[in-house]
Amino acid sequence: MTPAVEDYLKTIFLLSTRGETVTTGLLAKELQVSSPSVSAMVKRLADGELVHRGRTLTLTEAGERAALRVVRRHRLLETFLVNALDMPWDEVHEEAEQLEHALSDRLEARIDAALGHPTHDPHGDPIPSPAGSHDESWGQPLASAPQDCRFRIERVSDRRSDALRYLGDRGLRPGVVIEVGEQEPYGGSRWISIAGERVALAPLLTGLVHGRIVR
């Protein structure tokens, strides 16, 4: 399992669990590599029985197990960097991307124990268990929540560090309950209330916040 192989498997897993159709073109865009490089790696993964090749790419059982191991290390590292080193939640993703490939099983277990066996990382993403059992399902996006409801934030996508910083500065983090207000017309901002303060969120931001309606 080279770092490159782990990156491909993790990316296929994450894209598919977000409901996206995984193609070589999407992988090239996501990983920022050339299409010929993706095609060569996909062939390698298919020959190693880690990926099923067809009109779309899907992981085999072995490929998913390997992807979950990487996802687990990544999210444990993000949790460690925030909880133990007090790093901002918008900075830990890139650090974890580098460290996840070098983390040994022994150190992973020690970090897990030191953190008290967390089930979710700072962004609300579920951490796969050591046994491999996992539910990656996403809640309802804030963008589709009805007006005048109470909405508990459960996950905030870490794909945009600048957006994470903006949301975090305004208190929009997992576990927080907000009041959902009106939607400006023609794709405009969505108004929400948090701790008594009204905040306007652009569509880009409401698409990153997921959770569920509460009473």
Image: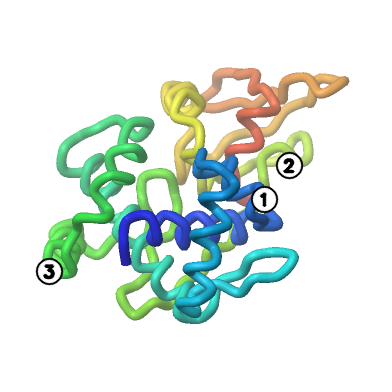
Q: Nearer the viewer, residue 213 or 121?
A: 121
User: x, y (%) of residue 65?
Assistant: 42, 75
Q: For marks 1 and 3, give the CA distance.
A: 36 Å
Q: Disc 1 or 3, which lies upstream in sequence?
A: 3
Comparing labels 1 and 3, the label whose residue is closer to the camera:
3
How many other residues sit within 10 Å of disc 1, few (<14), some (14-19) or many (≥20)? Answer: some
Please report the residue visible at 62 percent of the width from the left and 60 percent of the height from the top. Answer: 16
Q: Disc 2 or 3, which lies upstream in sequence?
A: 3
Q: Disc 2 or 1, which lies upstream in sequence?
A: 1
Q: Nearer the viewer, residue 134 or 14?
A: 14
User: x, y (%) of residue 105?
Assistant: 18, 69
Disc number for residue 106: 3
**Residue 197 visible (yes or no):** yes
Q: Secondary structure at mark 3?
A: helix
Q: Up-down: is 86 above or below 134? A: above
Q: Amino acid at mark 2?
A: Ala
